Structures are given as structure tokens and as C-alpha cells.
Image (cartoon, helix red, strand yellow):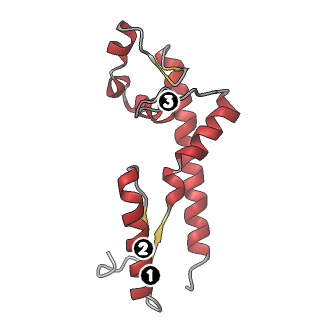
Amino acid sequence: LKVHGFEHVILIGDSGGNQRGMKEVAANLTAKWNGGKTTIHFIPEYYTYEAASKWAEDNLGWKQVNEGHHDDPVISSIMMTVHPDTVRIKQRIAKNKASINGIALAPVDKAVAAGKKLVDYRAQVTVDAIRKALANTSH
């Protein structure tokens, strides 16, 4: 991206396993590119699920109870905005398993509406973090 003239490279990711690597890449390339016209920024705020869960608690009234699964109502409701089948909602409803950590994923339209609010929240947090990172660049 630098070779092709990009001035700012922004790294965001939605996988916990990639966060440390992106942070390290940004730090290494920031040092290597110091003084050049291209900057690189790792934006961890996009992936900060604790903040999204807190927002959901404060704004959606969600009081999660950890059930010990690698599943989360924040992420599942966001996925449902794309299509409810991405979380196998029909099968969950059929087996009376349409909730995660005590948060209902049915009715579907209510979960999708919550997911849209979470998408908007995460987008705004990410935009704010990008703006802050770019404001701190030397050019």
C-alpha cells in the first residue's frame, strides 16, 4: 500500500488471534517508515468487545450471564444483521436455544434491530479512533 501511494494504512480486525500481530506490524512499520509520507495505525477499538458489551448493557438493557460458550449476543446479533441464518437461528429456535448468556436472539427482528444499533456503535467508536490516530500523525 505504501508503494502505491497510500498516505495512511489502517489496520482493524475482527479476530482475537490477529490483534497482537496487527499491533506489532503497525509498531514495526511506524518505526521503519518514520519521517515518510505513509503512516500505519492499528485500531484496536473496533475489536474491543468488552466496550460493546458494556454499551449493550447500558443502552439495550442486556445483563449477560456467562454460560461458558464461545458465543456472544453482541456478535451474534451483529451477524444477524447480514442474515439470521449466519447464526443458525431457525435451528436454535427449534431446539429452544435461541439465547446466549441470557440474551434472547428471538424474535429475530428485535435481535436484528439490536445488532444494527451495535453496528452503528462500533462504527462510531472505530471512526473516532481513526480520527484520533490520524490527528496524531506528523503530517
- Say which quarter of the image contains residue 2: bottom left
Residue kind at label 1, given as amino acid type: Thr
The C terminus is located in which quarter? bottom right
Residues at marks 1 and 2 touching, judged by CB atoms closer than 8 Å: yes
Disc number placed over residue 26 in the picture, else none: 2
Residue 136: % across, % down: 61, 77
- Comparing 72 with 3, the one in front is 72
Graded by Cα atoms within 10 Å as few (under 14), some (14 to 19) or many (20 or more), the crowding at tag 3 reads many
Give the residue displayed 46% in from the left and 89% down from the top: 34
Q: Locate residue 100 relative to residue 50 in the image: left or right.
A: left
Label 1 – label 2 distance at C-alpha: 6 Å
Label 2 – label 3 distance at C-alpha: 30 Å
- Say which quarter of the image contains residue 113: top right
Residue 87: % across, % down: 36, 26
Question: Mark 2 or mark 3: which comes first in sequence?
Answer: 2
Q: Locate residue 40 relative to residue 138 in the image: left or right.
A: left
The N terminus is located in which quarter? bottom left
23 above or below 124? Answer: below
Give the residue displayed 39% in from the left and 80% down from the top: 29
Q: Residue furthest left?
A: 3
42 above or below 31? Answer: above
Q: Residue furthest bottom?
A: 35
Disc number placed over residue 30 in the picture, else none: 1
Q: Secondary structure at mark 2?
A: helix
109 above or below 54? Answer: above
Question: What residue sits right under mark 3 in the picture?
Answer: 73
Give the residue displayed 34% in from the left and 13% down from the top: 90
Give the residue displayed 47% in from the left and 71% down from the top: 41
Question: Mark 3 or mark 1: which comes first in sequence?
Answer: 1
Residue 51: % across, % down: 60, 46
Q: Secondary structure at mark 3?
A: helix
Residue kind at label 3, given as amino acid type: Pro
